[in-house]
Image (cartoon, helix red, strand yellow):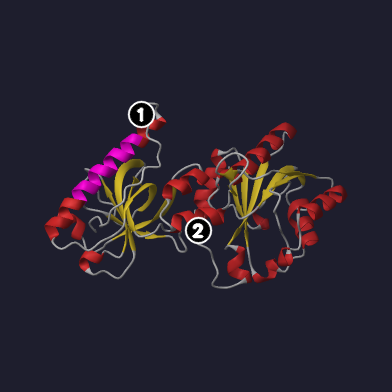
Amino acid sequence: MQRWRGLEDIPEGWGRSVVTIGSYDGVHRGHQLIINKTVARARELGVPAVVVTFDPHPSEVVRPGSHPPLLAPHPRRAEIMGELGVDAVLVLPFTADFSKLMPADFVAKVLVDKLHAVGVVEGPNFRFGHKAAGDVAFLTELGRTYDYEVIVVDLYERGSAGGGEPFSSTLVRGLVADGDVGGAAEVLGRPHRVEGVVVRGAQRGRQLGYPTANVETVPHTAVPADGVYAGWLNADGERMPAAISVGTNPQFDGTERTVEAYAIDRVDLDLYGKHVSVDFLNYIRGQEKFDTLDALLARMAHDVEQCRALVAGAGAEVHGDGDADGDVETAGSGETGTS
């Protein structure tokens, strides 16, 4: 899959293509429906499928300081899009000047002059151009002038048939902020992921027998609510069952909010300075300051066993060996150890 940053990166002589445009943060199941239709139509016409997206998020330029929490950085989005069959991803730098581009000019400069669109696939609420003045109706009107078709794809809805909230990045951000990582996974079609570089912490976890990877997250990352979670730590090409702590470590009067993952039964890892990712499967409990260190250690041992069982159950579901539904939640409070 080709990855371009800016219109100047598009190869000379690029031919016709089927295009979809949007922020596509998280590439959730609603996004996937649009992208799958883009790829399918491109295959029918024998042309490449292209996704156009933006960096930074447009709201940060239009309303500085309003950057929403990010569900996935651009490299991760491109990775998922490639798995869906996309042939090229174009990331357009979203600047103050770019934000002033009128809808008709955006279509002419991006879709027509550079990507030679033969088809454009969007959701019904798609808006584009200066002050979001362009909509699907206007896009379709211009298509008659520039000889491209517009295909509109309805978004999935969350909940029972015939009702529910449409899938959206805003919905996922809310679920993640509430710690409902099971609900977020339902909309995303996979566990919510946080990634970053492993940095040195206080190393208390190692002293307590539970060494953790202290992940310095990518700026603006959507981090789940404070608490303990079951999930996976992905590092060096390996996916390891993990007990994950998010929060300020109240047991030791911490103030800095961190994401720390203990790879269960792994005390041999040296991940400092490496880029890793953490996938959140289930919420276990909130954080609490225990009366004694022994009480904390007992709860941590229980947390690890609970996480071990939940991750194993999720694996059994994938392989058809069990009935875990990935939505188990257990109330409680405490925190895992720190690095």
| Residue 82 spot, x, y in % from top left | 56, 41
Q: Count the marks: how many?
A: 2
Q: Secondary structure at mark 2?
A: loop
Give the residue drawn at x 13%, y 61%. Answer: 292
The residue stretch that appears in magenta = 300-313
Residue to which mark 2 is pinned: 70
Q: Nearer the viewer, residue 263 or 162?
A: 162
The mark found on residue 54 in the picture is none
| Residue 117 spot, x, y in % from top left | 76, 46
Q: Which is more foreground, mark 2 or mark 1?
A: 1
| Residue 157 spot, x, y in % from top left | 60, 45
Figure quadrant of residue 109: bottom right
Name the image quarter holding the C terminus.
Answer: bottom left
Q: Residues within 10 Å of mark 1 (few under 14, many from 20)?
A: few
Residue to which mark 1 is pinned: 322
| Residue 106 spot, x, y in % from top left | 75, 59
Q: Can residue 209 be seen in this snapshot?
A: no
For marks 2 and 1 on the same chain, the one whose residue lies earlier in the sequence:
2
Name the outermost residue toward the bottom. 64
Specify whether 163 is left or right of 293.
Answer: right
Give the residue drawn at x 18%, y 55%. Answer: 206
Specify whether 198 is left or right of 157.
Answer: left
